[in-house]
């Protein structure tokens, strides 16, 4: 070992005692799957947000003070604009790399929230929120809410015409809350709309309050994940009591570290080459002006859509009013996020399942959850598209009335249909452990006489290519345990550690499938139709058989 | 070190000298060089004053070179196992839990002997916390009071254009539309009024409003009753006002009643008259709060 590393380690270890914990961290195993990178994308875009955000904060002025613009963007010179708007123009046109940083910040925010949502879907559809991971699910839900709120606030800071209209709508939504609404709105805005307090207050919330909360919750989210060890998909040799994958040092560290740079690279390309939020084209915010096609950032789309689709109802009685905006913009998100964060407990109520689950469900293996999830997701997707009713009506040259009613009907009709179709599909593929994977190729040849014959190519299909091999302990870990136990007989140790990865400890997940897979006689997977199941989806009996086999 | 570990390809390699990986090594090295060149280019770009597209492209190449290189290094030149690790059970042993309860109880018992002190502490802390809430909230903003019910429109106030000049009876063609404010409050969000002239006779939008629309001029609050956006679009053909935010449509001739979309109430109409100089003035303020609904209203 390098002398300097050793010296540093000694120095630290004598003071902090880090060597023991660091050793086990270096040898930590992370399961490998592309879908486990979705959360990483969120984390990395958040880091990009921090870097670019700090840069922007050096130039942005959070003030609604009206000034006459004299900057380098000629078309707006001489106009009365807020300092916030003027400083955002300054960042965009006069600060070196300012526009790239601003656009990267905006793109990173959109990607951050998108990655969280897709990550959430992955966790939901694979049942990775089940015991013992309910706490992390709740933390993740709160992170999503914080990300959306901070996204909206950040989007409002430039004080341009479109975002200013968004702030006006936000005031109305706050105002619509029963009992305390007008007080909440007045306290946040420092008086009646618009006032001059909202921009500086939004700034403090955007750069201090919410980021601090996100950092703290993110640390807890990652710490808990690290402590509980990541879930893994079902496969041979993977059990509820082990983790199979790559080792942190050096493989996982390189792959995850490199992936940060790839994420940042994509955000940089978008920031430099794809225009986003050109506020100089929208103009400064003026309360009595408004622009056509007022669409918010994508993650607010479902709320905007809900506001549009809501019938014109309002509840009036006993000298009080529950305004129209309350239902789509307060009640709907309130119910959405309550149900979302409590989902693990709701599901537990239904399934009565109190087992520890470290193996993910494949979505097709849990038809009820999957189809319910698809149905609910469809509901929000319809709402999202409903946020562009005006653009759609214009693009397709049809009436707003038609578009609005189409969406109202779709909102009610599409979720059950999507759920039902998903239910049928999942029922069809339930329990097939290799659905969607490539089968062994079949070569069909035509003889000179026109006779056809087919041959199954004698080549192992790429089924779980990495898990075909016997998983083994990290060598240094093995060594460490041997010394720690004072056991010099390594042969015996290898023997002793094998049951945990091998086939005979009962906890093995895929026990029953194994002979099927690597085949007793060296025959590999054959196309299901050849295997004689009856039809492209295979026979019901063999499927049920397999289903039974995959159950833990 | 000469441990033998399997790579992703499954065959066993001595991982201190993996054979067959020279090409990959060269490829990764080349990526790092490309990244380095892009970084130098980036420095030059900054030095020369910067250009967004070039900066974005070079940042992309510099970061991507490092990213792909490092990932490839991890993916192709390091052992992939698969490796296995046992999961220790998360929950503590029964013995540990028992010990925890005992420790907890020891302290609780000692504190429990002074339960009166505990209650008093609770009361003091609670009161202190509650009290902090009041100055904090009270400093944030004024209470709404009547401010959601009033605007700057009163009896006899001149209607002025965006530039501050008074609106006279000849300012709008039939079919025209303009945004007006009370004199002295140009640009004020709650005061904005949309003035339309659908016809050149005295329009009655609703019973009781016989004198509100002199010479075909009608004035409505421009703040949408749905979510507060400016109702910014006037369709002359159908004589309807459209809010571009959520597409609420208001029929001008019937007193800006909502005919489509989510808006639940008509836009409040401002009664106006033409004075002896031909200048438009308000007869009074609005007879109801403008804009979207809130809890306290609903008794009109």
Image (spheres, rainbow, N blue to C red):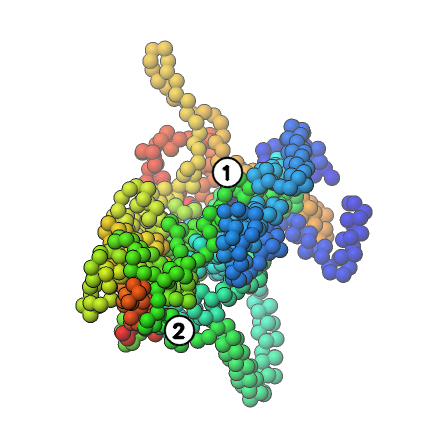
Which residue is found at the position 24% from the left and 64% from the top?
A: B213
Give the label on residue A125, or none. Answer: none
> Is residue A188 left or right of A402 when viewed as pictured?
right
Where, quadrant-wise, is the N terminus of chain B in this rendering? top right
Image spot of residue B81 (x, y percent): 60, 40
Determine if residue A124 is in view: no
Dividing the picture into quadrants, the one containing residue B266 is bottom left
Q: Nearer the viewer, residue B140 or A318?
A: B140
Which residue is found at the position 62% from the left and 46% from the top?
A: A96
Residue position marked by numbered label 2 in the rendering: B147
Q: Chain of mark 2?
A: B
Image spot of residue B228 (x, y percent): 37, 62
> On screen, A338 above or below A297?
below
> Is residue A215 left or right of B22 when viewed as pictured?
left
Mark 1 crowdedness (10 Å alpha carbons): few <14, some 14-19, many ≥20: few
Mark 2 crowdedness (10 Å alpha carbons): few <14, some 14-19, many ≥20: few
Q: Chain of mark 1?
A: A
> On screen, A446 above or below A476?
above
Image spot of residue A167 (x, y percent): 44, 60
Q: Nearer the viewer, residue A125 or B293?
A: B293
> On screen, B4 above or below B237?
above
Residue position marked by numbered label 1 in the rendering: A464
Image spot of residue B104 (x, y percent): 59, 76
């Amino acid at each position: 070992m390098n002398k300097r590393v050793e010296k540093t380690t000694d120095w630290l270890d004598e003071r902090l005692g880090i060597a023991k914990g660091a050793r086990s961290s270096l040898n930590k195993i992370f399961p490998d799957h592309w879908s486990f990178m979705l959360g990483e994308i969120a984390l990395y875009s958040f880091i990009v947000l921090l870097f670019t955000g700090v840069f922007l904060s050096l130039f942005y002025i959070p003030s609604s003070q009206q000034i006459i613009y004299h900057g380098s963007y000629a078309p707006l010179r001489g106009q009365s604009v807020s300092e916030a708007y003027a400083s955002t123009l300054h960042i965009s046109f006069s600060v070196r790399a300012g526009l790239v940083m601003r656009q990267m910040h905006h793109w990173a925010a959109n990607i951050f929230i998108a990655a969280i949502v897709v990550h959430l879907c992955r966790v939901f559809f694979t049942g990775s929120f089940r015991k013992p991971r309910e706490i992390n699910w709740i933390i993740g839900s709160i992170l999503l809410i914080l990300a959306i709120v901070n996204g909206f606030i950040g989007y409002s800071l430039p004080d341009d015409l479109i975002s200013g209209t968004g702030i006006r709508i936000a005031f109305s939504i706050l105002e619509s809350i029963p009992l305390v609404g007008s007080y909440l709105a007045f306290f946040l805005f420092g008086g009646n709309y618009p006032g001059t307090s909202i921009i500086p207050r939004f700034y403090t919330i955007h750069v201090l309050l919410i980021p601090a909360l996100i950092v703290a919750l993110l640390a807890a989210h990652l710490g808990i994940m690290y402590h509980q060890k990541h879930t893994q998909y079902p496969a041979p040799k993977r059990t509820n009591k082990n983790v199979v994958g790559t080792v942190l040092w050096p493989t996982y560290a390189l792959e995850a570290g490199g992936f940060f740079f790839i994420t940042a690279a994509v955000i940089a390309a978008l920031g430099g080459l794809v225009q986003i939020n050109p506020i100089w084209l929208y103009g400064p915010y003026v309360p009595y002006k408004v622009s056509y096609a007022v669409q918010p950032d994508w993650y607010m789309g479902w709320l905007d859509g809900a506001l549009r689709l809501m019938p014109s109802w309002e509840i009036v009685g006993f000298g009080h009013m529950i305004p129209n905006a309350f239902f789509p913009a307060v009640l709907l998100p309130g119910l959405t996020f309550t149900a979302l964060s409590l989902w693990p407990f709701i599901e537990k109520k239904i399934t009565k399942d109190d087992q520890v689950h470290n193996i993910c469900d494949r979505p097709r293996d849990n038809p009820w959850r999957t189809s319910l999830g698809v149905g609910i997701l469809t509901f929000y997707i319809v709402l999202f598209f409903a946020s562009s009713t005006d653009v759609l009506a214009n693009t397709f040259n049809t009436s707003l009335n038609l578009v609005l009613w189409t969406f109202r009907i779709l909102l009610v009709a599409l979720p059950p249909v999507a759920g039902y179709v998903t239910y049928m599909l999942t029922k069809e593929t339930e329990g097939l452990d290799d659905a969607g994977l490539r089968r062994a190729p079949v070569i069909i040849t035509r003889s000179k006489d026109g006779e056809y014959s087919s041959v199954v190519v004698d080549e192992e299909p790429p089924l779980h290519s990495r898990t075909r091999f016997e998983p083994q302990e990290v060598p240094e870990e093995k060594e460490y345990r041997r010394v720690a136990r004072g056991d010099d007989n390594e042969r015996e140790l290898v023997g002793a550690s094998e049951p945990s990865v091998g086939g005979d400890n009962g906890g093995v997940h895929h026990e029953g499938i194994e002979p099927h897979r690597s085949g007793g006689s060296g025959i590999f997977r054959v196309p299901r139709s050849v295997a004689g199941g009856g039809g492209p989806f295979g026979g019901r009996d063999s499927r049920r058989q397999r289903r039974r086999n995959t159950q833990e | 070190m000469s441990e033998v570990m399997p790579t992703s390809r499954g065959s066993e390699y001595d991982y201190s000298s993996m054979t067959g990986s020279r090409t990959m090594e060269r490829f990764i090295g080349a990526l790092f060089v490309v990244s380095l060149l892009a970084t130098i280019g980036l420095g030059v770009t900054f030095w020369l004053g910067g250009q967004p597209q070039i900066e974005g492209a070079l940042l992309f190449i510099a970061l991507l070179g490092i990213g792909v290189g490092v990932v490839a290094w991890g993916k192709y030149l390091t052992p992939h196992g698969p490796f296995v690790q046992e999961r220790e059970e998360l929950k503590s042993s029964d013995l540990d839990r028992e010990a925890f309860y005992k420790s907890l109880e020891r302290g609780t018992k000692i504190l429990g002997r002074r339960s009166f002190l505990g209650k008093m502490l609770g009361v003091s802390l609670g009161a202190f916390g509650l009290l902090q809430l009041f100055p904090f909230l009270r400093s944030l903003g004024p209470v709404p009071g009547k401010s959601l019910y009033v605007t700057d429109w009163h009896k006899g106030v001149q209607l002025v254009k965006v530039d501050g000049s008074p609106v006279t009876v000849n300012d709008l063609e039939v079919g025209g539309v303009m945004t007006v404010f009370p004199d002295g409050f140009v640009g004020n969000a709650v005061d904005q009024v949309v003035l339309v002239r659908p016809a050149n006779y005295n329009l009655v939008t609703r019973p009781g409003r016989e004198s509100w629309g002199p010479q075909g001029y009608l004035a409505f609050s421009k703040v949408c009753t749905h979510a507060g956006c400016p109702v910014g679009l006037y369709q002359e053909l159908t004589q309807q006002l459209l809010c571009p935010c959520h597409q609420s449509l208001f029929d001008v001739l019937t007193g800006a009643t909502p005919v489509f979309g989510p808006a639940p109430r008509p836009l409040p109409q401002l009664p106006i008259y033409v004075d002896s100089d031909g200048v438009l003035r308000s007869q009074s303020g609005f007879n109801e709060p403008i804009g979207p609904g809130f809890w306290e209203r609903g008794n009109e």
